[in-house]
Amino acid sequence: MSYIAITMRTGAEQSDLLVAQLSLLGYEGFEEQTDALVAYIPEADFDEALLKETLAPHGVSYTKETILPENWNAVWESNFEPVQVDDFCGIRADFHRPFDPQPAYEIVITPKMSFGTGHHATTSSMIKLMESLVFSGKRIFDFGTGTGILAILAEMMGAAVVDAIDYDEWAVNNTIENIAANNMKKIKIWQADNLDAITEKYDILLANINCNILLQFMGDMRRLLQPGGILLLSGILPSDEVQITESAVSQGFVKEKKIEKNNWLAMQFVAV
């Protein structure tokens, strides 16, 4: 499957808003550079007229490039830099040197077409919330796993069971590769675009997706959690906080805390 890469010259605040808007149009991956934002979408889903309509109010120009699957590694390898969340978790590619000093957990990934390198605020804030929780012996579900970063970190933190799904075949295959690269043994990953077939109960559910998907599946996420289970959500703009909170409360959750970074929220709820 080929992808379209859209490169836009933007500032940091503009980039955050564009990521949110383009996510709703089907753009699956984003790369934030010093003065630019690169967004990726499957070629079959690309609508240039809709892109122009979205960018027009922002006065943002763009360039377009078609990326064939076999060229993807060259694209991300040329731009991907190691990232570290405090002294807790470091994320790097296999061609980077290990961190020195080493954080508590070090994850090696090859992101390919999947979202989740740790660079974006949505992922790093989820990692920050995970740092304060006990994963040892717990049952974990990762909804929309992307590169598998959060699932891998959960196993590294001692989880007894880690189940993960993603609707995208690229993401599932990528997660399988990253599981192997990090010598993980407990993660099960499969492809699905809903939670209908899942009947297990979990202690912690991770969902770093987007507001619309979180709202759509809030009831299912509550169904999958044990009473007292923890729900971590990310991919939320501050303007969506009230809507997400009201939906969660209506399904039997209580909000415990939130983290805001670069105009993105990550939120923690407990199932009652």
Image (spheres, helix red, strand yellow):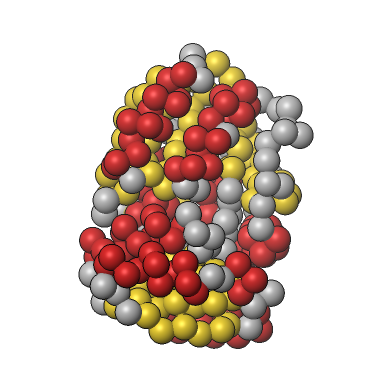
Decide: is 265 above or below 249.
Answer: below
Query: Quarter-wise, where is residue 71 in the image?
Result: bottom right
In the visual, does 177 lie left or right of 206? right
| Residue shown at 38% from the left, 28% from the top | 245
Q: Is residue 112 visible?
A: no
Residue 179 picture quarter: bottom right
- The one of 2 and 56 positioned closer to us in this rendering: 56
Residue 150 vs 132, above or below: the answer is: below
Residue 186 in picture, x, y percent from top left: 69, 45
Residue 103 lies, with reference to residue 254, above or below; the image says: below
Question: Which residue reaches farthest right?
Answer: 197
Question: Residue 177, image x and y in percent?
Answer: 67, 64
Q: Measured from the top left, where is residue 95 in percent x and y?
A: 51, 79
Residue shown at 29% from the left, 41% from the top: 239
Residue ID at (38%, 32%): 243
Q: Count of labels shown?
A: 0
Left or right of 162, for residue 239: left
Q: Position of residue 110 (x, y in %)?
A: 57, 70
Quarter of the rendering occupied by the N terminus: bottom right
Please identify the quarter of the rendering in which residue 172 is found. Answer: bottom right
Viewer-closest of 104 and 179: 179
At a point 44% along the width and 39% down the height, the residue shown is 233
Tell me if I can see residue 63 in this picture.
Answer: yes
